[in-house]
Amino acid sequence: MNIISMTTICFILTMNQMEQEVLLSMQKKYLRAQALCMKTTFTESVWISIATDTHDRLVIGCVYRSPNSPNDNNDKLELLIKEAIAIKATKLVIMGDFNLP
């Protein structure tokens, strides 16, 4: 995972075997965030945990699922979502391109 930091924006990138990228950006001046490493083997996603001024913990995930994703990859995506829910953050946002019919 590469983290590229600029003055006000931080980009977190990941690349899978097919050389696809998932991007999540945030404004650093308002947030205290760290990258999360998920245990599930679904590779096309990035996750961050954000501590807010009100002591909440916000977890944000950005996911890409290929339109011709095989069933085993769909199962991995389901496990990934369950893992994210199990973190028990105050707030959880999962977004991205799921390419579901």
Image: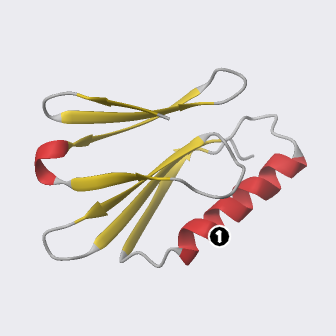
On the picture, is 69 further left or further right than 45? right
Q: Residue furthest right?
A: 71
Residue 58 place in picture, x, y as percent:
34, 66
Residue at disc 1, secondary structure: helix
Q: Nearer the viewer, residue 75 or 48?
A: 48
**Residue plotted at (72% across, 50% down):** 41
Label 1 sits on what residue type? Lys
Answer with the quarter of the image where residue 85 lies. bottom right
Residue for badge 1? 82
Q: Where does residue 53 sit, x and y in percent of width and height? A: 13, 69
Going 57% across and 76% down the picture, which residue do you hit?
86
- Depth check, front residue: 50 or 39: 39
Residue pictured at 36% horizontal, 77% vertical: 90
Q: Is residue 44 above or below residue 39?
A: above
Measuring from the top left, give residue 5's x and y in whole percent. 25, 30
Task: Please tell me in which quadrant of the rendered image residue 56 appears.
Answer: bottom left
Name the residue at the top extreme: 19
- Taking the image as shown, residue 10 lies to the left or right of residue 1, namely left
Depicted 91 relative to depicted 50: above or below: below
